[in-house]
């Protein structure tokens, strides 16, 4: 009897574990591919990480109005740059980020907080400090809905900045619309790019995977293009972009959703090579910590040269490059939604400086760039407000941001979502690991316009409304 | 359907993975036989060992780093066994197993707190750097160790239980704890030895898995599931059946990866491979239940 009970208990644990293993890797962002893949057959990478030609920006010393061409932040300054701590009544800004065992986006809110801390040490928003209330959620819709109400109704935040969640956009988009909030976020799910109330500083996994596929095609992938994403609701849609792109270019597209983290990375490596066939392309869509064991297994089994390997943005992280051997040099094409972290450009240096001073526990990564940019855009928008700072004035200022220039982006950023969609970051570049570092290997390129995505309409609107046109 | 050529690499990979499941299963069975505790925190202890080793790498000689990790595994299970073993000694095995879920949750919390999952971590055992081509497949020494080590551990444990004094005491404990105590066997010391031995095997498993599958905390923690399935196949009694069960689970799970072209409805058979331990364990339990003799009233 005792043994039977124990058997039942053990079987229950097995069931529990089986459910528990069906989790996500939660990659944060992704990129896309050019409509015409005419680029060089081999991805040539410059020896040095050069900034994209159109993003070199001189430092300016004061923030411009958020609705106009904005500034590159001068070294040592944040916001007003007075060097005096702000002491007035706090301005409450909220955020929400996923923190779960398999997806942790709190690095993003940590960097936004770091930037706001720097702003507060430099005069705040006309003397008033920013009080940043960043909540953590565990991918529970009820919790997420409750936290949005807490932030808005209980904490009475006047704006929301830096939120990054696996599912929050879908859960709260109607509530934010009802309340009149316009959020500057880092987006994951497609819902974040399909609501007029959100504008993401990144482009999300759908477009970033597409960018990885474009790079793989340019590098000579032929026959099949396989795309692998976390086995999480909504990621079949993420994969659909690569599959459609492959078909448009005469390749067979294969979509795979895989439980992450991987219980058998070596087996998965073999499967991907078999699926893609010799010379095919494989686009991975996982975070750095999740994808690294797979890359190591690929290397160990001598499969690096069997197919063209590409990825969405998240592995653009120096710690991934450090974990890979020289066999991966120039062989892993990562679509990077932002410039390389050691570009040496003013804004990037500024971000590194802020991170080291205010958030040293956060790794330098694409996630850090997202948090920094969200803080930068929001601060300049707040400084542009003339008159009282209220929920209405803050969200109006956020909504009106356009042509915000930073050398971390390929093109200027804006909030506008006239088309009903919002993918203002839709041009990016490719990086590869080389000798323990990530280096840029392709210049900025447009993510592919496809019948299944709204980029053609968005770019037409950009042209018509004069968005996304300013350069640093 | 995949050809034998397609299946070959998965069979090799499955053997190595199955070996680690088998070793974990043997560790679980030895502890259960000696103390009556089914340690559901086994994977979490292994994860802790691997991450402690990772933390020491770079600071000290790598062999010392791995040894420290393995020793920590022994220490944690020993402390748990010494502190909580006696109070739970007379309780039902179900209660004892449930108590280890508490240890699992505490360790999981500590792991996520100390080593946040957002950071990329990895290590490569020196054994992975030595590889050979066998029948067209590249095999490294971590994989070979993964296959051979469980066999050595199982054989060593079986001999230990049969010929050593402590081993004999452990077997006696498995039969009747009270009677064994009455005979003057230092029960607590013998149980502590079982906890220590199980923890050390757990540590070795964790360090090996850290190289084979990476250092993800959740993955390592829940790799107790195939080990548990192997132990159930061995009916929590037989070391050799547990060993075989672990290998079978590893091979089946890995080989299913090759069946990506075979569909059940819209879903590829490969996507069901994580269910393999569960299905095999249930089949084994049903098989054993079928063979159980009828109880005469």
Image (tube, rainbow, N blue to C red):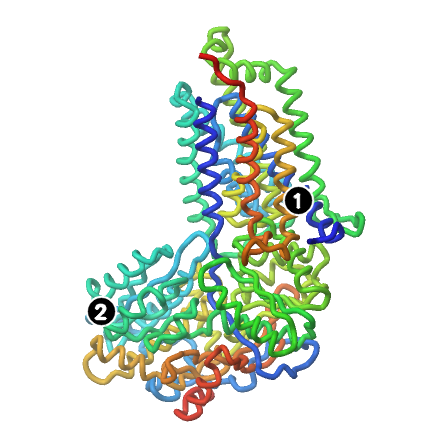
Q: Position of residue B257 (x, y in %)?
A: 63, 51
Q: Is residue A433 visible?
A: no
Q: Quadrant of residue A201?
A: bottom left
Q: Secondary structure beneath disc 2?
A: loop
Q: Which mark is residue A82?
A: none
The residue sitting at 43% across, 78% down in the picture is: A423
* Label ID, residue A90: 2
Quadrant of the image containing the N terminus of chain A: top left
Q: Position of residue A3 (x, y in %)?
A: 47, 24
Identity of the residue drawn at 69% across and 66% down: A307
* Same chain for the residues under marks 1 and 2 in the image: no
Residue B209 seen in the current view: yes
Q: What residue is disc 1 on?
A: B14
What element does badge 1 sit on? helix
Chain under numbered label 2? A
On the image, which quarter does residue A277 sit in?
bottom right
């Amino acid at each position: 009897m005792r043994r039977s009970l124990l058997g039942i208990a053990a079987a229950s644990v097995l069931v529990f574990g089986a459910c528990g293993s069906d989790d996500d890797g939660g990659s944060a962002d992704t990129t896309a591919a050019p409509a015409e893949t005419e680029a060089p057959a081999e991805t040539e990478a410059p020896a040095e990480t050069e900034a994209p030609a159109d993003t070199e920006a001189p430092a300016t010393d004061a923030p411009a109005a958020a609705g106009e061409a904005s500034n590159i932040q001068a070294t040592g300054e944040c916001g007003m740059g007075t060097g005096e701590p702000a002491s007035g009544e706090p301005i409450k800004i909220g955020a929400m980020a996923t923190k779960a065992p398999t997806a942790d986006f709190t690095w993003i809110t940590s960097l936004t907080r770091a930037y706001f801390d720097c702003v507060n040490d430099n005069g705040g928003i006309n003397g008033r400090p920013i009080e940043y209330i960043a909540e953590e959620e565990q991918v529970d819709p009820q919790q997420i809905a409750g936290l949005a109400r807490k932030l808005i109704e209980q904490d009475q935040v006047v704006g929301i900045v830096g939120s990054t969640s696996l599912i929050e956009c879908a859960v709260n988009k109607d509530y934010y619309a009802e309340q009149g909030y316009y959020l500057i976020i880092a987006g994951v799910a497609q819902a974040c790019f399909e609501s007029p109330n959100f504008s993401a500083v990144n482009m999300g996994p759908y477009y970033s995977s597409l960018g990885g596929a474009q790079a793989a095609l340019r590098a000579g992938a032929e026959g099949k293009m396989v795309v692998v994403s976390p086995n999480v609701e909504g990621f079949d849609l993420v994969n659909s972009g690569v599959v459609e792109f492959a078909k448009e270019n005469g390749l067979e597209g294969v979509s795979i959703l895989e439980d992450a983290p991987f219980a058998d990375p070596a087996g998965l490596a073999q499967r991907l090579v078999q699926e893609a066939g010799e010379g095919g392309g494989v686009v991975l869509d996982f975070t750095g910590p999740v994808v690294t064991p797979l890359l190591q297994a690929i290397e160990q089994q001598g499969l690096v040269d069997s197919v063209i390997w590409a990825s969405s943005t998240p592995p653009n992280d120096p710690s991934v490059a450090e974990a890979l051997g020289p066999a991966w040099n120039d062989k892993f094409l990562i679509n990077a939604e932002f410039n390389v972290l050691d570009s040496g450009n003013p804004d990037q240096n500024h971000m590194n400086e802020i991170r080291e001073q205010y958030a040293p526990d956060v790794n330098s990564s694409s996630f850090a760039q997202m948090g920094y940019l969200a803080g930068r855009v929001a601060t300049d928008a707040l400084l542009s407000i003339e008159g009282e700072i209220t929920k209405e004035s803050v969200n109006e200022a956020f909504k009106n941001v356009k042509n915000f220039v930073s050398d971390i982006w390929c093109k200027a950023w804006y909030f506008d979502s006239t088309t009903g969609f919002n993918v203002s970051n839709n041009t990016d570049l490719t990086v590869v690991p080389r000798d323990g570092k990530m280096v840029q290997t392709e210049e900025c390129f447009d993510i592919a316009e496809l019948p299944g995505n709204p980029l053609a309409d968005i770019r037409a609107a950009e042209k018509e409304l004069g968005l996304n046109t300013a350069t640093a | 359907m995949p050809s034998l050529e397609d299946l070959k690499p998965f069979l090799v990979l499955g053997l190595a993975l199955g070996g680690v499941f088998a070793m974990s299963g043997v560790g679980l069975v030895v502890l259960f036989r000696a103390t009556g505790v089914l340690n559901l925190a086994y994977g979490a202890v292994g994860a802790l060992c691997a991450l402690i080793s990772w933390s020491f790498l770079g600071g000290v000689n790598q062999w010392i780093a791995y040894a420290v990790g393995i020793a920590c595994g022994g220490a944690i299970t020993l402390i748990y066994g010494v502190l909580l073993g006696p109070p739970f000694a007379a309780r039902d095995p179900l209660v004892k197993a449930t108590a280890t879920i508490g240890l699992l949750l505490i360790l999981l919390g500590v792991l996520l707190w100390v080593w946040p999952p957002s950071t990329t971590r990895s290590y490569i055992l020196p054994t992975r750097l030595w590889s050979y081509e066998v029948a067209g497949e590249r095999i490294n020494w971590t994989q070979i160790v993964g296959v051979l080590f469980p066999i050595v551990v199982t054989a060593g444990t079986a001999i230990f239980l049969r010929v050593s004094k402590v081993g004999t005491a452990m077997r006696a404990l498995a039969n009747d704890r009270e009677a064994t105590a009455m005979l003057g066997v230092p029960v607590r010391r013998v149980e502590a030895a079982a906890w220590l031995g199980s923890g050390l095997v757990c540590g070795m498993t964790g360090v090996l898995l850290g190289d084979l599958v990476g250092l993800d905390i959740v993955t390592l923690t829940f790799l107790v599931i195939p080990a548990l399935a192997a132990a159930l196949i061995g009916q929590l009694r037989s070391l050799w059946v547990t060993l075989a069960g672990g290998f079978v689970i590893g091979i089946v799970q890995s080989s299913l990866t090759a069946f990506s072209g075979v569909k059940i409805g819209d879903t590829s058979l490969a996507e069901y491979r994580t269910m393999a331990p569960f299905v095999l364990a249930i089949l084994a339990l049903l098989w054993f239940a079928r063979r159980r003799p009828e109880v005469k009233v």
